[in-house]
Amino acid sequence: MKVSIVITAYNVGHTLRKAVESAVWQTWDDVEVIVVEDKSTDGTRDVLFELAEKYPDVTVLLCSRNVGAGLARRRGISYATGDYVLLLDGDDWIEPDYVERLARKAMEEDADIVTGGVTMHGGDGRVCEMSYAERTVEGDAKIADYFMQTTMFLNNRLVRRSLYGKVPYSDRRYIEDVPTCVKLLWWAGLVCFVGGQGYHYMYNAGSLTHTADAFKTALFKTLCIADLVRFFAEYDPRWLDAYPWEEAYRYGLEQLAQCNPTDDMVAPYRKEWEELKQFAES
């Protein structure tokens, strides 16, 4: 069983080597490593070229312009040839046996998604370990379980590649994991969890995720709700009543209103702003 590890890299010249080598040195035999460089402004490309020379089996994809995490991951996934895909950020790393533990569970259970634990590293040196009990879920429990999880991102999950044919990775630059993951879980058959940690997540206070202003956060959270409402309206209307979408949507609109949006605030997100307006009118 082949696993594709897709690494996205933007301004991570100081950490990319550790990320790539953690993927290259996996104990699972059949692994391909794909790195998508998203038009960095630091020395990321220089580091990547050195790594590509040292590890010629690593596939390097260079973006001609900065497209953001969503489209960069989508591009990497489109080049993947593995049976399963694991996402890895260029400032994170994984333990040598992480893929093996998830892949063995996927093979044993014929699971579509396998999730492993995460170690969160803060900039102040603090470490928080989060793991899951060994279990298998299916049916409606897949999504209900997800909304109760502490970590809602996608990187710690081995995903059957064919699922991305049904759910292209979100093209958003922010809060792109949640709508993608929920849709993948809906399409998935069995979803399994393995105990222990193995994915190391670096909390970067300067990243887009952690420096977003109140307006941007409210806008993209509300768009995430709109994405999921549209999805469930088309594929499984039962979920429209199973979760307080309307309450969450109204709260998002209230948060946006409290920001007193100006043209200058909206300008960087004109496309997303118009999309939300169209959803409100539909």
Image (cartoon, rainbow, N blue to C red):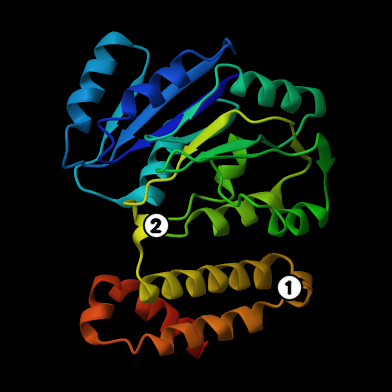
Q: Nearer the viewer, residue 34 or 41?
A: 41
Q: Visible in this render: residue 240?
A: yes
User: In this rendering, does residue 80 appear at all?
Assistant: no
Q: Which residue is mark 1?
A: 243
Q: Residue at x 50, y 41 (%)?
A: 126
* Residue 175, percent from left and from top: 47, 60
Q: Nearer the viewer, residue 160 or 105?
A: 105
Q: What residue is rendered at 16% in x and 42% in y?
A: 41
Instruction: Answer with mark 2 or mark 1, whichever residue precedes in sequence.
Output: 2
Q: Is residue 198 left or right of residue 192?
A: left
Q: Contact (CB < 8 A) between labels 2 and 1?
A: no
* Real-space CA distance between mark 2 and mark 1, rounded to the nearest whole angstrom: 27 Å
Q: Which image quadrant is residue 52 in?
A: top left
Percent across and percent down for residue 133 are 80, 37
Helix, strand or loop under label 1: loop
Q: Amino acid at mark 1?
A: Tyr
Q: Is residue 132 left or right of residue 246?
A: right
Q: Position of residue 254 (x, y in %)?
A: 50, 88
Q: Is residue 133 left or right of residue 122?
A: right
Q: Quadrant of the N terminus?
A: top right
Q: Amino acid at mark 2?
A: His
Task: Please name the residue shown 76% across and 37% down the image.
Answer: 192
Q: Position of residue 141 (x, y in %)?
A: 82, 54
Q: Residue at x 60, y 23 (%)?
A: 99
User: In the rendered picture of this protein, how many numbered marks are placed on residues?
Assistant: 2
Position of residue 71 in the picture relative to residue 77 (left or right) = left
**On the image, numbered disc 2 is attached to which residue?**
210
